[in-house]
Image (cartoon, helix red, strand yellow):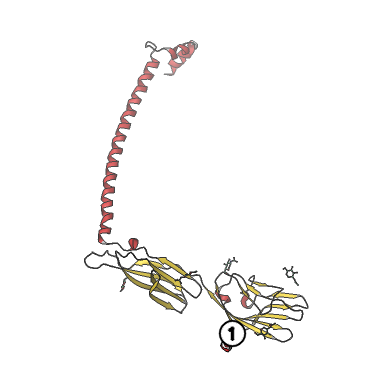
Amino acid sequence: MFHVLVLFCLYWWHLTGVFGESVSVMEGDSVTLKTNVTEIQQAHDIWWKFGSSRSDIAKIKKQQQIFSTFDGPDGRFRDRLKLDNKTGFLTITNITTQHAGLYEVEMSGVKLSSKTFSVSVYAHLPVPVISSNSSQCSSSSSSSYCSLLCSVVNVGHVTLSWYKGNSLLSSISVSDLSISLSLPLEVQYQDKNSYSCVLNNHINNQTTHLDITQLCHTCSDQGLPLLYIVLISAAAGSLLIVAAVLWYCFCWKHKQIGQKTVIHEIYENDSTLPNPKPRKTKSKEPVYGNIDRNNQK
Ligand SMILES: *[C@@H]1O[C@H](CO)[C@@H](O)[C@H](O)[C@H]1NC(C)=O
Ligand SMILES: *[C@@H]1O[C@H](CO)[C@@H](O)[C@H](O)[C@H]1NC(C)=O
Ligand SMILES: *[C@@H]1O[C@H](CO)[C@@H](O)[C@H](O)[C@H]1NC(C)=O
Ligand SMILES: *[C@@H]1O[C@H](CO)[C@@H](O)[C@H](O)[C@H]1NC(C)=O
Ligand SMILES: *[C@@H]1O[C@H](CO)[C@@H](O)[C@H](O)[C@H]1NC(C)=O
C-alpha cells in the first residue's frame, strides 16, 4: 500500500512537479494546456506566461469579466491562442517550433498556485527514401548481395531504422537539428522477406517498404530490356514498311479518282456524248448565257 502511495506521489510529482507537465505535439496541430481546476471561481485570477522572459500571453480576471489573450513576444502567438472562459484552459492552435518551450499558469484564489508545462513541438517527418547503392548489376557468380541505402534529409531528434518483418536490424539516431541521415542494408537478390525503413521520433513515424525486385537488378534482369529494345525496333520497322505500303496504295487510288473526275468533266462539257441530263436543264437558259460563257473561255 505504501509503495503504491509512493509511486502515485512520484507520478503526480512528475506531472506537476518542478519540471512541469511534458507535452509533445506535432507541428500544425493544436494543444490545450489545462490548469488543475475545471471551473474558475469568482475569486480566481489566471495568468498564462511563456518562455524564460515569462511574457504574458493570456489573462483572466473573473470578477471584472476580463478574458484576454496577447500576441506575445514578437507576435508569435497572434491568432493562435484560445482561452476557455469557463475553465481558463489555454489552447495553442496551428503550433510551430517557435511555440516550443516553457509555459506557466498562475492562479490566484484562496492561495496562489502555479503549474508549468514543457511543450515540445515535432516537425512532420519526411518519408525515407530507399535507393540502390550498387550502380552496376551483380553478375550472379561474383556477388549475390544487393547494397541499399535508406536516406532522409533535414531531420532532427529522430531515429532511422531497418526492419526485417517486425525485427530491428540496425538503427541510427540523431539529436541535432536539420541534418541528413542514411543507413545501409545488404540483401540477397532472391530474398523474399519484407524489409522496411522506418524514421521515427517520440510521437510519430514514417515507413517505406523495400521492393527488392524494383531496386535490385541482376545482370540477367538488365539483359532483358536490351531484348525488348531489339523487339520494339523490329516491330517499329515492320510498322514503317506497312505504313509505306498503305501510303503508296492510298496515293495510287487517289490518282485514279482524280483521273475519273477529269474524264467526267470532259463528258459534261461535251454535248454530243450520252448522259445529257444536266445539259438539258442548262439548255433552258437563254442563248446569251451560252454565248457569254463561250466569250469568257
Ligand atoms: C492546483 O495544483 C497546485 C499544485 O500544483 C495546488 O497547490 C493547488 O492547490 C491546486 N489547486 C486546486 C484548486 O486544486
Ligand atoms: C464565454 O464565451 C462564450 C462563447 O464565446 C460566451 O457566449 C460567453 O458569454 C462567455 N462568458 C463570459 C463570462 O464571458
Ligand atoms: C499554420 O501556420 C503556418 C505557418 O505559420 C501558416 O503558413 C498556415 O497557413 C497556418 N495554417 C492555418 C490553418 O492557420
Ligand atoms: C556504397 O556503399 C559502400 C559501403 O557499403 C560505400 O563505401 C560506397 O561509398 C557506397 N556507394 C555509393 C555510391 O553510395
Ligand atoms: C508507427 O506508428 C504507428 C502508429 O502511428 C504504430 O502503430 C507503429 O507501431 C509505429 N511503428 C514503429 C516502427 O514505430
Q: Is residue 31 left or right of residue 229?
A: right
| 83 or 144: nearer the viewer | 144
10 Å crowding of disc 1: few (<14), some (14-19), many (20+) = few
295, above or below 40, in the image:
above
Q: Is residue 169 left or right of residue 64?
A: left
| 39 or 273: nearer the viewer | 39
Residue drawn 25% across the image and 57% down it: 223
Q: Position of residue 144 (x, y in %)?
A: 26, 67
Quadrant into which the N terminus falls: bottom right
Tag 1: amino acid: Phe
Residue drawn 35% across the image and 22% down it: 260
| 15 or 48: nearer the viewer | 15
| 219 or 169: nearer the viewer | 169
Corner quadrant of residue 117: bottom right
Q: Position of residue 79 (x, y in %)?
A: 64, 70
Marks counted in the figure total: 1
